[in-house]
Image: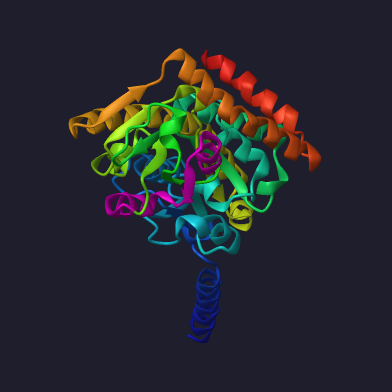
């Protein structure tokens, strides 16, 4: 009887010891799961927001749930101007915003926004990623860059006055951001710096006389409801580059295998954003015309005038980058070479 009791005591002790080890060890799934947040200023109904959210779901799918992402659209986590810093500080783990909202902070990548005469979002997106791949500028060194994308040609839109010549633009207050503000100045208008979420109301109330934006914004941001005219000046067409970045510490904590999966998804999603910009440009064009609005083109002579007016912006940017040891001429040459793929 005593032997049986002793045996029972030993077995029970081993059982309790095993249970204590299990209790002390975290569950494998909990240890492997990364819970991240993603901040995006685009409204949830915008195609660019929908693509960003689909990126999140694709990451979750391909990592088999090891990486989960809570998505916040429409500035519900951070506003557009603060997104980059919020990623550095860990307020958002991943974030999307425009280079133009923090002027001067990203000098190399902002060269992509210059009026090189962009004809499509696909071209602009390719250029942005080509430039980053070649130069890896230190200006993004405090985050993990996932990818860039950029909208199609940015054009002038006005509330009331039709603009057919450079002279027509003089004295008009034009909502613009970053490089587009410089374009407005070069063309003779008065730039009014303003992020996209504030544009509709400002146009509606007449705070500004017009806006520089891609055609998609006429529907995506409903600006076609508060503007009546558009001037399609391809010779002075700029773009706006958008970054998608991640907190470096959070990226480094991901398993190498999951990092590779995300990198592969990035290569797929960047061109998808460019194509979506072009598709939404067509939607924006139809929407603009459905409002009874008018589109103006430029004849060859006037087009050349607009192109000549903005050309110094490119030269000045290259010179400034060179002055600061940032290979300005090489950056400009890379942009032009990349654009040749789409001629």
Q: Is residue 70 shown to the viewer in this render?
A: yes
Residue 284 screen position, x and y as percent: 29, 32
In the depicted structure, whether residue 168 falls above or below residue 246: above
Q: Quadrant of residue 54?
A: top left
* Placement of 168 over or under 210, stated as above or below: above
Magenta-span inclusion, residue 174: no
Residue drawn at (43%, 36%) of the image:
169
User: What is the residue that sits farthest to the bottom in this orientation?
Assistant: 2
Q: Main secondary structure of the magenta part?
A: helix
- In the image, residue 27 sits, relative to residue 141, either above or below, namely below
Q: Is residue 73 in view from this perspective?
A: no
Tell whether 52 sits left or right of 255: left
> Was residue 187 drawn as part of the magenta stretch in this picture?
yes
**Horizontal and vertical percent for residue 7?**
53, 78
Coloration of the structure image: rainbow
User: For the point 46% across and 34% down, which residue is it?
Assistant: 269
In this rendered view, identify the residue nearer to me: 272 or 10.
272
Residue extent of the magenta highlight: 180-206
Q: In terms of depth relative to the viewer, which is nearer, 314 or 49?
A: 314
Q: Position of residue 101 (x, y in %)?
A: 52, 51
Q: Judge left or right: residue 62 versus residue 185.
A: left
Count of numbered marks: 0
Left or right for 284, reference 235: left
Taking the spot 64% from the left edge, 49% from the top edge, the residue there is: 104
x and y percentages locating residue 273 in the rendered image: 43, 33
């Amino acid at each position: 009887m005593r032997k049986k009791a002793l045996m029972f005591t030993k077995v029970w002790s081993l059982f309790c010891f095993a249970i204590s080890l299990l209790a002390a060890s975290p569950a494998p799934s909990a240890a492997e799961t990364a819970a991240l947040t993603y901040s995006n200023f685009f409204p949830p109904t915008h195609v660019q927001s929908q693509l960003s959210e689909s990126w999140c779901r694709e990451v979750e799918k391909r990592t088999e749930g090891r990486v989960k992402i809570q998505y916040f659209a429409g500035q519900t986590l951070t506003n557009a101007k603060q997104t980059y810093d919020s990623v550095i500080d860990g307020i958002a783990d991943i974030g999307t915003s425009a280079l133009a909202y923090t002027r001067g902070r990203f000098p190399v990548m902002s060269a992509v926004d210059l009026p090189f005469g962009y004809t499509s979002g696909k071209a602009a997106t390719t250029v942005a990623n080509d430039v980053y791949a070649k130069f890896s500028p230190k200006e993004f060194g405090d985050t993990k860059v996932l990818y860039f994308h950029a909208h199609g040609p940015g054009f002038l839109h006005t509330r009331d006055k039709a603009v057919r010549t450079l002279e027509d633009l003089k004295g008009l207050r034009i909502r613009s951001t970053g490089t587009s503000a410089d374009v407005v100045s070069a063309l003779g208008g008065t730039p009014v710096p303003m992020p996209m979420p504030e544009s509709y109301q400002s146009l509606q109330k007449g705070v500004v006389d017009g806006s520089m934006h891609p055609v998609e914004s006429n529907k995506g941001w409903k600006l076609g409801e508060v503007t009546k005219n558009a001037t399609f000046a391809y010779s002075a067409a700029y773009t706006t580059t958008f970054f998608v970045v991640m907190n470096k510490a959070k990226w480094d904590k991901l398993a190498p295998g999951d990092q590779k999966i995300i990198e592969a998804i990035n290569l797929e999603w960047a061109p998808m954003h460019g194509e979506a910009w072009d598709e939404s440009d067509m939607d924006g064009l139809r929407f603009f015309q459905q409002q009874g609005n008018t589109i103006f083109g430029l004849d060859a002579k006037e087009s050349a005038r607009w192109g000549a007016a903005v050309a110094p912006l490119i030269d000045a940017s290259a010179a400034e980058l060179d002055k600061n040891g940032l290979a300005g001429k090489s950056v400009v040459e890379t942009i032009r070479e990349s654009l040749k793929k789409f001629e």
